[in-house]
Image: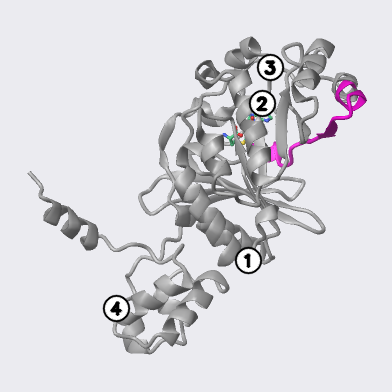
Amino acid sequence: MTTSLDNKLIKSAKPEVLLGKSLEELTDWVRQQGQPAYRGKQLYQWLYEKGARSLLEISVFPKQWRESVADYPIGRSTIHYRQIAPDATRKYLLRLVDGSIIETVGIPSAKRLTVCVSSQVGCPMACDFCATGKGGFLRNLKHHEIIDQVLTVREDFGRRISNVVFMGMGEPLINLNEVVAAVHSLNQNVGIGQRSLTISTVGLPGKINQLARHNLQVTFAVSLHASNQQLREQLIPSARYYPLDTLLTECREYVRITGRRVTFEYILLAGVNDLPEHARELAKHLHGFQTHVNLIPYNPIEEANYQRPSQERIKRFANILRRDRISVSVRYSRGLEADAACGQLRTSLT
Ligand code: SAH
């Protein structure tokens, strides 16, 4: 039997990693190590600006102290594998300290460098069209493991990160606390504006409301993918426990609480959810809603039999929404050739 004292000892025996800590927390830590407070600022700069991977690298620290804390965990992953697609998108398999592998994607353009981060190892949602869900679920990520993904892509490209989207592996709202902590840290410590961060969710009862109460300024996207409950259940198993009406009510509440609009993502699957009647049904749901719709033509995955609709069908779907004054864009995913596009993330090397 373990007592609460044992638990405390177990906890303190395993040092917490340094990445993800605030300037104040790092300052407390250096003080506990018997160092002057200003070393906290130095540590902060080396962790977040220079992307230090070990305390040994921090050349402004006295050599003797550096060597004595050399093994203290910072919380950085290593690049296990990297693949570069013809469109310059880079997909990474990152090995975490416990040996788990996650995927991260770096998507460059002339003006931007967007990082698509994972929030979990795998994903428990098992959406029918998504490769990640087919591989099962292992665990939630800690907030420093999310920050690490951003620093890794920054280092690999040698460029400033402009945007971060929580659209990699996992369902961010299952891991809400760590995701919110990562948002704050990316904002305050890595210097990325909250509006340049996007949280995407398939929706879970009560969770959108919880997120709204954090009052973040992030872009919020909901993976809707269907215009009625029956179709949604067919594509997204968890929809059975979360009626479309309840989801939309929570989204309206989100707009009311945060004053920010909600983006709806709608994957287009030929013959399944891309018919004109689906577009009209969707338009009806979104009438008078402060929103934007992102249509995502399906990216093929091995385990599913769906097809991407023709350009013509995609245009027709978009135009029906536009006629109803709904703001729409069609988002072609980058990185298709490296299996790095939306829905294609899985932790295999093939
Ligand atoms: N679980 C969250 C975060 C993952 S985001 C969510 O569902 O929103 C991944 C985005 O890619 C989602 O909009 C998802 O629905 C979409 N997606 C999944 N599989 C896809 C595929 N095969 N082709 C295109 N988009 C896909």
The residue that disc 4 covers is 32
**Residue extending farthest left:** 1
Secondary structure of the residue carrying tag 1 is: loop
Q: How is the image coloured?
A: one colour
* Whole-number angstrom distance, CA of label 2 to CA of label 1: 31 Å
Answer yes or no: disc 1 within 8 Å of ligand 1.
Answer: no
Residue type at numbered disc 1 = Gly
Residue type at numbered disc 2 = Leu
Residue 135, position in %: x, y? 48, 29
The residue that disc 2 covers is 224
Residue type at numbered disc 4 = Gln
Q: Is residue 97 above or below residue 70?
A: above
CB atoms of marks 2 and 1 within 8 Å: no
Crowd band around label 1 with a 10 angstrom C-alpha radius: few (<14), some (14–19), many (20+): some
N-terminal-most mark, 3 or 1: 1
Q: Which mark is residue 306?
A: 3
N-terminal-most mark, 2 or 4: 4
Q: How many marks?
A: 4
CB atoms of marks 2 and 4 within 8 Å: no
Q: Is residue 270 above or below residue 10?
A: above
CB atoms of marks 3 and 2 within 8 Å: no
